[in-house]
Image (cartoon, rainbow, N blue to C red):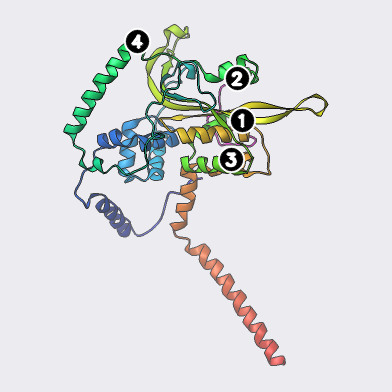
Amino acid sequence: MGYVAVKGGTHAIKESVKRLKYERLQKQQVLETEKIEAGMRGLIDQVMSESSLYNEPLAALAIKQAEGNPEEAIFLLRAYRSTLPRKHCSQIIESEQMKVERRISASFKDIPGGQILGATTDYTHRLLDFGLMKETEELIREWLTEYEAENRLNEEKLDAPDILLPKVLDYLRKEGLIPLRENNDTEPDDVTRESLEFPSNRSQRLQILTRGQTGAVTSLAYAVIRGYGALHPTVGELRVGNLPVYVGHPNEVGSEEDDYYIGDVKATEAEMLMPFMAEKENGRKELEFEIGYGLCFGQNETKAIAMAILDNCLEHPDNSFPSHNEEFVLYHIDSVESTGFISHLKMPHYVTFQSKLDRVRKTKNSEEETAERQEVRR
């Protein structure tokens, strides 16, 4: 449950809200939402993923209103999301249809279609770039003109800028190195409409993991690798790109050709290879691989990889490790639930605390009276 409300003096609350606005405006600078959207791509993607609402302008507005606090921005966006009607359900999106911008594999050097480094900080020096403090719109336009001209030449040479790339792990499946699984076309549960119950199914787990707080999901996955689960996965394939979204006609049942294309959703997908020792006949053991899967809005690679690790953990429940306990993981990674509960501790607890204080006083007085009686007897 989320804690939101607080009772108090009306005048005091109004003054508190005014002070909040003053803190945002005191330097007399207007932070335009368009500039937040343009320059805070990572934060925008994180907020959209954790709020389950893909809308960059609204995410920018929430970030502005929350003064850059991601937990508050996510709270605002989820609250807004709950007011929206659901008019359509999209058709199933196949990630093979992704228009890839970035695609790497840590498992194989040579992959069909090649490794595409794309936009990433992985290969940059983690040094402050003081030149950004002198960046101007004129310099930006000059750089963009040069870069776009160079990019057009490269695309003309390749002659296939939007090629659809095969999945790396499909080649392992063809070799029989990864077991084949039947498609599960059961309609997924919706964790935003129905309360989570245990044992949960995989669709519920994946939804909560992709909505989970990036830091919490990453921390638990890190704990798994360090020893709480003793897994050391490898990135089979990580891809970032745009997924096309189609909806069918609301009143007609037609073929896929009749579906309506409504736009793209940028997403990060991670397929992790998990080694394990499989039991064979006569007590023999063989090394095999399983898959952990992660998918989230925007370019959020650490989150997708961590999500895939926990996905595999929760497929193999083990109460010896918190990271393999679905109730522990799924109840504690939600940004709004966890920050809401912690924040509610700031709210008035006068009655309950006074009750505890009275009990402490009575106990102390009782102990003092007992000690005095014993002293008198001596």
Q: Amino acid at mark 3?
A: Ile
Q: Determine which residue is flagged by label 1.
A: 274
Q: Camera-side residue: 257 or 131?
A: 131
Q: Residue furthest right?
A: 282
Q: Residue at x 34, y 10 (%)?
A: 159
**Secondary structure mainly formed by the magenta segment:** loop
* Amino acid on which disc 1 is placed: Met
**Which residue: 23% across, 49% down?**
25
**Residue tagged 4:** 159
Q: Residues within 10 Å of mark 3 (few under 14, many from 20)?
A: some
Tell me, yes or no, whether the two marked residues, 4 and 3, touch with CB atoms within 8 Å. Answer: no
Question: Looking at the image, is mark 1 or mark 3 earlier in the sequence?
Answer: 3
Which numbered tag is attached to residue 225?
3
Nearest the eye: 35 or 84: 35
Please report contact status of discs 1 and 3: CB closer than 8 Å, yes or no. no
Q: Which residues are magenta?
A: 187-201
Q: Nearer the viewer, mark 1 or mark 4?
A: 4
Mark 2 sits on what residue? 184
Residue 192 belongs to the span the image colors magenta: yes
Q: Is residue 123 above or below residue 153?
A: below
Which of label 2 and label 4 is nearer to you? 4
